[in-house]
Amino acid sequence: MADISTNPARLRPARNADGPAVKTLVFGVLREYGLKPDPGCTDADLDDIDGHYFQRGGTFSVLEEADGTIIGSVGIGLVSPRVCELRKMYLSGRCRGRGLGRTLLDHGLAEARRLGFRRVVLETASALKEAIRLYEQYGFQQYKPEHLVARCDQAYFLDLE
């Protein structure tokens, strides 16, 4: 796990007030990779972080710099009592290469375990090569779900047991 004490950033639980800044981050990263934001559907969860994550048994965290600028995010959403979805794991392009992606993934997996989930699933786009490489390094395995959201063409799972 990357030591965020050596990086000028800290993780904290997100609040609904963070929604606009998280949207700016997520939509910016999506566009950077040629992917289209979907504020009316796939990304609508960012309009009510509390309702879509915390009130449903999940969690959502942001990574912020000392000045409060949000540079990363990671969410754990409920799929079933034993399965969660890793969602909205994004990191600002200017902050990559510092181990912060690992920090976000480590945190997300720790939160999934803390909440009692036994499996983590995620959907991603093949354009997000760095993220896919990281997921595979952590042992995520590709599978074919019944349905993928429009901008995603790959799905992965990781058993936590």
Image: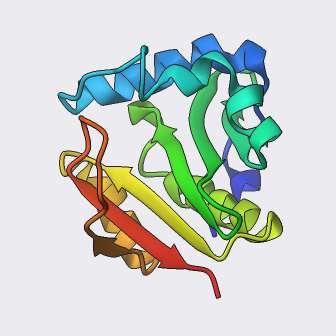
In the rendered image of this protein, does residue 61 appear above or below residue 131?
above
In what quadrant of the picture does the C terminus appear? bottom right
Q: Determine which quarter of the picture holds residue 131.
A: bottom left
Q: Position of residue 128 (x, y in %)?
A: 26, 47
* Residue 126 spot, x, y in % from top left: 19, 51
Q: How many marks?
A: 0
Look at 17% across and 28% down and name the residue there. Answer: 34
- Note whether 78 is above or below 12 in the view shown: below
Q: Is residue 123 visible?
A: yes
Q: Nearer the viewer, residue 122 or 98?
A: 122
Give the left or right position of residue 44, taking residue 116 as reference. Answer: left
User: Which quadrant of the view contains residue 75?
Assistant: top right
Is residue 2 visible in the rendered image? The answer is no
> Residue sitting at 65 percent across and 77 percent down?
118
Location of residue 81 in the rendering, given as x and y in whole percent from the top left corner: 71, 64
Q: Residue at x 75, y 18 (%)?
A: 16
